[in-house]
Image (cartoon, rainbow, N blue to C red):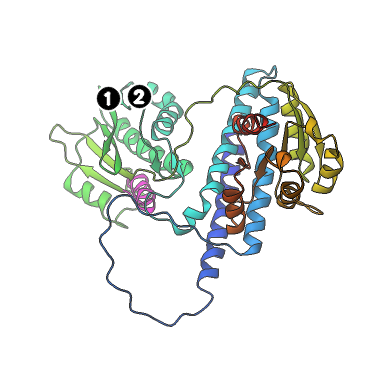
């Protein structure tokens, strides 16, 4: 049941990103421009440049709302982490947290995905996906008595292919190999190897099944020449090939003199920031008095509980006006002010700018937490103000680090 929830959540995120990409592209093509003959493009080297896309107000609001909900789900999962749970529920909680992080990465890279240069797709860890796919088919491998030989380095660069898409592609290729092995005589062997090849990652799967005939190879590599009744795994191969090509990669058969069949997938390395492979320990801070300002009740409550669990004294309010009342003349008792940007009545930016004029020492204790990644003015403000900012959905360790950074100015 947990896996269905995870895949369903990923599908909803995919639909959302697809809708926003279409809307952004439509906005860019809405105003006709007189045709101009462009100059010949200059030769380019290295990874493709990643460009930002300016979204309209409605799309930016939707993205901000989605990030708020992801932040709330992530914070609630953090609160449950470490609670006494049976193994199945603990595993479901880990899966939930992983799905929130993957959804966060999709929204984080959405502006790059809208342009979609080679290498700017959502990054995935190939070794994690491959080992997960093999674990999923462990029963079939044992049933067929397959000797599995894998060469998958632990430290590999990310590939530019969404995790769900990479999983589906590798699962289809594994099923293709298992279909061939089932139809062959023992001993059966499957070799899987991953290696770097310039700007790409190469994944090879070799099986000891019967050698492929010329006709079979032609069916596999020529589109639309397979049928449902072909019986040789052509459908799995063709679908995996289409998935690889949609990510800017290739999928081909490599001739092997020793028999069997070897499929090689080549995928571009990701040009985006890699995912964190390990979870760092929460930075230790002395007991602090922290003001939390967020109009979202679930986010406000979850952040308050998380900070209190770390031993801090927390006051939580829902907008900038209430924050000013709480700060009052005794504001120096607050070591940090953690505030959202977009709020009714008085937002986080207006609150900061008002205090920067009147009480600059207090303004230096601000930490901004926001889901508004899309607006140019938001990015510009955060760059210019010099205060630490944590993007929703946030990693709790990042939040604690930012608080520690400003608390030292108190």
Q: Is residue 248 magenta?
A: yes
Q: Determine which quarter of the picture holds residue 280.
A: top right
Residue 249 got which mark? Answer: none
Which residue is at a point 70% across and 49% down the rendered structure image? 341
Q: Is residue 195 magenta?
A: no
Which residue is at a point 80% across and 30% down the rendered structure image? 333
Q: Secondary structure at mark 2?
A: helix
Q: Determine which quarter of the picture holds residue 291.
A: top right
x then y, percent, for residue 12: 60, 49
Q: Mark 1 Cα within 10 Å, few/some/many (few <14, many 20+)?
A: some
Where's the N terminus, which quadrant? top right
Q: Mark 2 to mark 1: distance in Å? A: 8 Å
Say whether residue 227 is visible: yes
Would residue 255 be found to the left or right of residue 241 on screen? left
Residue 144 got which mark? Answer: 2
Seen in the picture, residue 264 relative to 60 is either above or below; the reply is: above
x then y, percent, for residue 240: 37, 46
Where's the C terminus, which quadrant? top right
Q: Are marks 2 and 1 in contact (CB under 8 Å)?
A: yes
Q: Mark 2 Cα within 10 Å, few/some/many (few <14, many 20+)?
A: some
Q: Secondary structure at mark 1?
A: strand
Magenta residue span = 234-249
Main SS type for the magenta part?
A: helix
Which of 316/146 is in front? 316
x then y, percent, for residue 176: 34, 39
Q: Which mark is first along the chain, 1 or 2?
A: 2
Residue 188 got which mark? Answer: 1
């Amino acid at each position: 049941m947990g896996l269905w929830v995870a895949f369903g959540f990923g599908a909803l995120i995919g639909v959302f990103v697809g809708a926003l990409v279409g809307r952004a592209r439509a906005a860019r093509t809405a105003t006709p421009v007189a045709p101009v003959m462009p100059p010949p493009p200059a030769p380019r080297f290295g990874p493709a440049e990643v460009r930002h896309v300016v979204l309209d107000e409605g799309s930016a609001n939707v993205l901000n709302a989605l990030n708020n909900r992801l932040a709330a789900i992530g914070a609630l999962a953090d609160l449950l982490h470490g609670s006494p749970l049976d193994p199945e529920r603990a595993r479901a909680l880990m899966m939930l947290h992983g799905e929130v992080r993957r959804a966060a990465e999709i929204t984080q890279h959405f502006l790059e995905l809208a342009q979609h240069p080679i290498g700017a797709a959502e990054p995935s860890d190939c070794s994690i996906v491959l080992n997960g796919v093999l674990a999923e088919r462990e029963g079939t491998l044992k049933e067929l008595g397959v000797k599995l030989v894998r060469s998958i380095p632990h430290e590999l660069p990310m590939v530019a292919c969404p995790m769900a898409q990479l999983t589906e592609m590798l699962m289809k290729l594994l099923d293709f190999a298992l279909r061939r092995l089932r139809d062959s005589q023992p001993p059966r062997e499957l070799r899987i190897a991953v290696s770097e090849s310039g700007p790409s990652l190469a994944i090879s799967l070799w099986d000891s099944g019967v050698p492929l005939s010329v006709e079979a190879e032609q069916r596999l590599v020529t589109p639309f020449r397979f049928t449902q009744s072909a019986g040789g795994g052509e459908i799995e191969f063709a679908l995996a090939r289409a998935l690889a090509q949609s990510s800017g990669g290739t999928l081909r058969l490599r001739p092997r003199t020793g028999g069997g069949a070897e499929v090689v997938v080549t995928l571009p390395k990701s040009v985006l920031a890699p995912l964190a492979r390990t979870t760092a320990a929460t930075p230790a801070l002395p007991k602090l008095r922290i003001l939390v300002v967020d109009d979202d009740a679930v986010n406000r409550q979850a952040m308050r509980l998380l900070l209190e669990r770390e031993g801090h004294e927390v006051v939580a309010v829902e907008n900038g006006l209430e924050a000013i009342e709480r700060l009052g003349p005794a504001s120096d008792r607050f070591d940090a002010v953690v505030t959202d940007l977009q709020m009714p009545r008085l937002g986080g930016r207006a609150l900061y700018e008002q205090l920067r004029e009147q009480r600059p020492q207090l303004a230096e204790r601000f930490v901004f937490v926001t889901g508004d990644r899309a607006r140019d003015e938001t990015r510009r403000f955060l760059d210019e103000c010099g205060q630490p900012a944590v993007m929703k959905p946030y990693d709790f360790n990042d939040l604690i680090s930012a608080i520690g950074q400003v608390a030292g100015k108190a």
